[in-house]
């Protein structure tokens, strides 16, 4: 008896699904095994970013916990919070700069040195009492703005050097998304949205400061995902 057409089609469909599953499993195994067959790339830039992100979130948590103690404590905690933000911004440069320019030591050291010096300067400005005077407000704001804006140079340079490689576009997309999230967070924080539209409605939940923290955590997570792409790219390709 000849097999029914529906049965034959079902068998072919099952075989195709099995082949796709086998192919997917093989790709996953290759991605896992390949880095083990070569010497993994150094992880310190990635860990530096994780450390900066954790310090930022810890400093913010301590600030919110202890700032209600007294006016003096609030003043100290606010400076610590600013230092945490500066640490997060500066260490966020380490993975993209190092892994993009690890084969170009001059540019790697140039970009890393610049952001490190700028980050240290911003942290000192955030912590030292002398810089808390109103006349230094422009300097403080300029340092934070300069740190964020300086990220455009290595990203554009990376695109110029590695144009056409999928990892470059993948990481750049993550970095643009991170910048958008941080930018929206800063805008929400500065404009006091949405409580300025409906005063009293967001005193407990949903106010701008909470949204700001959510967007910062989201931006840090997006950058973490970009770091994983960098690690896999350099582990498999090297220079």
Image: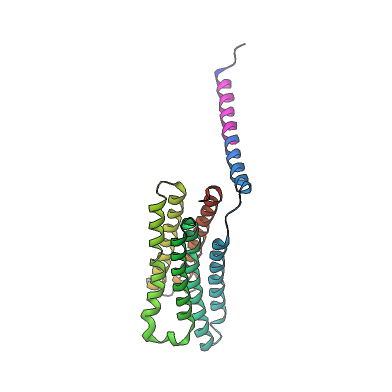
Q: Is residue 191 above or below residue 28?
A: below
Tell me: 218 left or right of 135: right
Could you tell me which residue is drawn at 39 percent across and 76 percent down? Answer: 141
Could you tell me which residue is drawn at 41 percent across and 87 percent down? Answer: 133
Q: Residue furthest front?
A: 106
Residue 7 among those drawn in magenta: yes
Q: Is residue 74 above or below residue 230?
A: below
Could you tell me which residue is drawn at 51 percent across and 64 percent down? Answer: 217
Q: Residue furthest top?
A: 1
Quick one: 156 or 54, which is closer to the camera?
156
Q: Position of residue 36 (x, y in %)?
A: 63, 48
Give the main secondary structure of the magenta stretch: helix
Tell me: 208 left or right of 55: left
Q: Position of residue 177 (x, y in %)?
A: 43, 58
Question: Which range of residues does the magenta coloring cover?
Answer: 6-21
Quick one: 47 or 192, which is closer to the camera?
47
Residue 221 in sight in this render: yes
Q: How many marks?
A: 0
- Quadrant location of the N terminus in the rendered image: top right
Could you tell me which residue is drawn at 45 percent across and 60 percent down? Answer: 178
């Amino acid at each position: 008896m000849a097999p029914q057409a529906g049965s034959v089609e079902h068998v072919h469909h099952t075989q195709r699904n099995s082949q796709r599953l086998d192919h997917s499993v093989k790709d996953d195994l290759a991605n896992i095994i390949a880095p083990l067959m070569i010497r993994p790339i150094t992880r310190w830039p990635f860990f530096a970013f994780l450390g900066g992100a954790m310090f930022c979130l810890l400093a913010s948590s301590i600030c919110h916990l202890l700032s209600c103690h007294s006016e003096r404590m609030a003043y100290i905690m606010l400076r610590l919070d600013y230092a945490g933000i500066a640490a997060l911004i500066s260490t966020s440069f380490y993975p993209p700069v190092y892994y993009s320019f690890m084969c170009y030591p001059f540019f790697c050291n140039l970009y890393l040195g610049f952001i490190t010096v700028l980050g240290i300067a911003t942290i000192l400005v955030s912590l030292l009492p002398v810089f808390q005077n109103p006349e230094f407000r422009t300097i403080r704001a300029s340092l934070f703005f300069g740190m964020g804006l300086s990220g455009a140079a290595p990203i554009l340079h990376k695109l110029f050097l590695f144009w056409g490689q999928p990892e470059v576009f993948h990481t750049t997309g993550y970095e643009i998304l991170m910048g958008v999230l941080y930018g929206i967070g800063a805008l929400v924080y500065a404009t006091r949205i949405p409580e300025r539209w409906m005063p009293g409605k967001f005193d407990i939940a949903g106010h701008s400061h909470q949204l700001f923290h959510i967007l910062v955590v989201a931006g840090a997570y997006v950058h973490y995902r970009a770091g994983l792409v960098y690690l896999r790219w350099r582990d498999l390709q090297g220079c």
